[in-house]
Amino acid sequence: MAGLRMKIAKIVLLVLLFLTGLLYVAAELVYSATRDRSEFGAFENAMRLTHLVFTLPLLLVPIVQFSRRLRTKRPGLHRALGRFYLGATMLAAIGAIYLGLGFDEPGRRVPLVIFAGLWFYFAVAAWLAAYRRTFDVHARFVVRTYGIALAFVLVRLLGQFDIALLGSITNEEVRNVTREWLAFVVPLLLIEAGFHWRASGQAKHERQLRGPGSARSIEAIQGAPEPKASTRPRP
């Protein structure tokens, strides 16, 4: 029963993430098509377009990659999508660093550049972990990259409820900076908490499988006599 509940919760979460990503993609496409870009230079417009093109699939591809059935039955497709996803993440992160450095509000540059740098690092670490066949480490870094990709969605969602959530901060620039930090920090904290919770559950399950007699208690270890030093002469 517990396994069924976890499976249903996972399906519901993936559907919500897919719909959120889809709405974000649609909103970004409309915004890009209707915005006046005459104030930007050709290179900056190219960087913005590159960032957008490589960011949009990042919200949808991982949802497919999280499928255990795909990993086991179609490993070739899983690897191909993974290479595309991590490569796109690196390019999108480079674009985010460039765009972040040019923000009008200096306070917003700091969180965006820091987390865009982390985004790039997580993607490189995930790629290297897969190359070294440490797939548990690889999976955790992929989830972290997805958390930062979702942060770009979250910062826009928080902007829709700016006054309701952060109305006590009267200074608009401070409120914008606070929203940036919350959008990036909260998803990563939740992800790390999820890793810890899952590892704790697995450790508990393994102890139950081993049984009470498989490991010595702390009291038994503390009360055990220390081994005597050998009195045999050294050769």
Image (cartoon, rainbow, N blue to C red):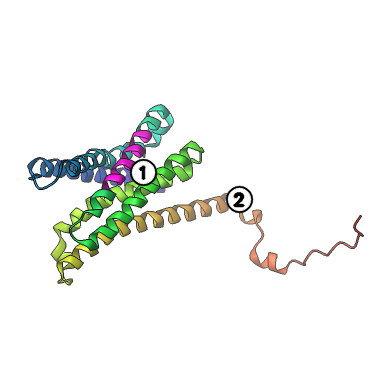
Q: Is residue 73 above or below residue 6?
A: above
Q: Is residue 206 left or right of residue 165?
A: right
Residue 133 is situated, as x and y percent measured from the top left of the image, at: 51, 37
Type of secondary structure dominating the magenta stretch? helix
Assess disc 1: are there few (<14), some (14-19) or many (≥20) residues with their C-alpha within 10 Å of its C-alpha.
few
Q: 206 or 80: nearer the eye?
A: 80
Q: Amino acid at mark 2?
A: Arg
Question: Does residue 41 lie above or below 187 as drawn?
Answer: above
Q: Is residue 125 magenta?
A: no
Which labelled disc corresponds to residue 210? 2
Residue nearer the viewer, 84 or 150 = 84
Q: Quadrant of residue 33?
A: top left
Question: Which residue shows up at 10% across the image and 48% down it?
Answer: 39
In the image, what residue type sits under mark 1?
A: Lys
| Residue 199 rendering spot, x and y as whole percentages | 48, 53
Badge 2: how crowded within 10 Å, few (<14), some, or many (20+)? few
Marks 1 and 2, how far apart in space? Answer: 26 Å
Which residues, given as a range, are shown in magenta?
82-96
- As helix, strand or loop, the secondary structure at mark 1 comes to helix
Residue at which label 1 appears? 7
Which label was assigned to residue 48? Answer: none
